[in-house]
Amino acid sequence: MRFRTKLIITSVVIVIFPLFLVFGLFLVGGRYIAQKQISQERSGSVDYNMVSNPIEAFARGTDELIKGIEAERLIHPFILEDPDVLRSIDEEVASLYSYIIVKRGDVSFYVAAENAEDAESIISELNYEGGGNSIFVLPESRLFVRQYNFIFSTGEPGSLYIISGIKAEFPKSLIIYMAVSIVLVLLLTSILLTTWLGRSFIKPIDELNIAMQHIKDGNFDYILPTDIKEKGEIGAIYRNYEDMRLRLKESAEEKIERERQNRELISNISHDLKTPITAIKGYSQGLMEGVAANPDMQRKYIKIIYNKANDMNNLINELTLYSSIDNNRIPYNFVKLGVAEYFGDCIEEIGADLESKSIKLNYSNLTGPDTQIVADPEQLKRVVNNIVSNSVKYLDRDDGTGQIDIRILDEVDSIRVELEDNGKGIAQKDIPNIFDRFYRTDASRNSKQGGSGIGLSIVKKIIEDHGGYIWATSHEGEGTCMHFVLRKYIEFAGGSETVTVDHNI
């Protein structure tokens, strides 16, 4: 529930709830007070007009009764001498919490048996000379009295007194009772609303404060209690906290992993640089000391030194490119490339290098002569060179039977490039991880194979930035095949022929 909705509900409850509760207490308490002051209760119901304004209710009720009596006396002048009539009048005024007393002169003529005990204590007060048809209050008992005078058949004066069981001081009691009730109602309302708002806001905020303290202390595993279920602003804050916690945890884990990878990279590069540097130092020392006595031997030493320097340069280039990948700043210059022409040039360059290493290269292009792709020629060549050099590294064949097959296949709206070797292959458990940074299937890290362990991760990054994807298949002892797919360039009718993008990703 939203905070604004809760405030509206609170405002309404503060007004409505006390009103309903006070009204209920008025009904219950009013009945209790009224019945407490009734001399003899003859009715099971309560007239709440007698509770709120007893004098007016008593006057109105007795007026109707007196009018009825006067109307009957016009027909039967001495009807008030009949005990049955007087009993019926007594029953009628019971609804007003009253009873009647009839006096004949100074003598009591009629009092109902059930009211005799109460009537005895107040008959002496009825000598008060009221009007012929008036309402007054008895001085001592503080009861309401309605007096109606008439003449008996004997000529003697008579009076009908309607005695109200509600005392004159009743409204004062009601005011005190209602004042206390209102205070209690407001107190109860305050407690209920405070408890509700406390459970809705104070408790969740306290939990959030504890959770933020855990975040401050670097504990990203603390989860907010699930017993607090809010759908409004507090619920949104809870969800935002959980999202923040997960992202901070992920970021912290990535930072730890990146630091571990950086340490591993430094270790790998240091190890891989140490091998060619040792070789360069050794062969250079041989040249200086005259170990290579003839020109052929000297050329061999110089060639080895040159190759080792190239190996060092390649390692440094990989490190530079790794830094670009880590910062997502690889520069791309996308242009349209003819598949046949571009890969034909790549094969010529790769073939010459493989021939010098006694490795056979087979190439086939099954795409159409006009097939084009949009790619960065320099970065795509890096992909092919990295895969080929990786294959050469793990061919593990000294008998001159090493072989690499490069095939380009047509797949309707894309091309698929396959680079397959007949090396020692990759174990099935290692295939899902070979494109991860620093992952090596060769745990021994011998100097012959070396490498920084980031070559295939660079390949994957470049292919994905071209909108393609790459995967590997392999069988141990038989060889490995790398597959990557690139989309074709398709020029629609009326479309622009220039598709060159120069940006940093």
Image (cartoon, rainbow, N blue to C red):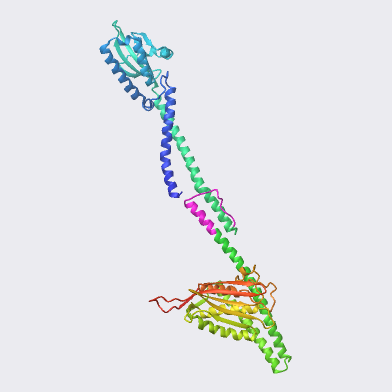
Number of residue marks: 0
Q: Which residues are magenta?
A: 221-244
Question: In the picture shown, does residue 29 fall above or below 219?
Answer: above
Q: Is residue 241 magenta?
A: yes
Q: Quadrant of residue 279?
A: bottom right
Q: Residue furthest left?
A: 74
Image coordinates of residue 239 in percent, x first then y, are 51, 55
Q: Judge by depth and name the residue closer to the eye, 185 or 414.
A: 414
Q: Residue at x 64, y 87 (%)?
A: 306
Report if residue 226 lies within the magenta region. Answer: yes
Q: Quadrant of the rendered structure where residue 213 is?
A: bottom right
Q: Residue furthest top?
A: 154
Residue 62's place in the image compared with 314, above or below, is above
Q: Quadrant of residue 165?
A: top left
Q: Is residue 400 visible?
A: yes
Residue under the point 67% across and 83% down: 400
Question: Where is residue 375 drawn, in percent x and y?
Answer: 50, 77
Q: Is residue 187 left or right of residue 69?
A: right
Q: Give whichever of 210, 466 is nearer the camera.
A: 466
From the viewer's side, name the closer residue of 433 and 183: 433
- Residue 68, percent across and down? 29, 17
Give the x, y percent position of residue 87.
37, 13
Front position in the image: 491 or 100? 491
Residue found at the far bottom of this picture: 294
The answer to whether residue 317 shows anywhere in this view is: no
In the displayed structure image, the side of residue 66 where residue 27 appears, left or right:
right
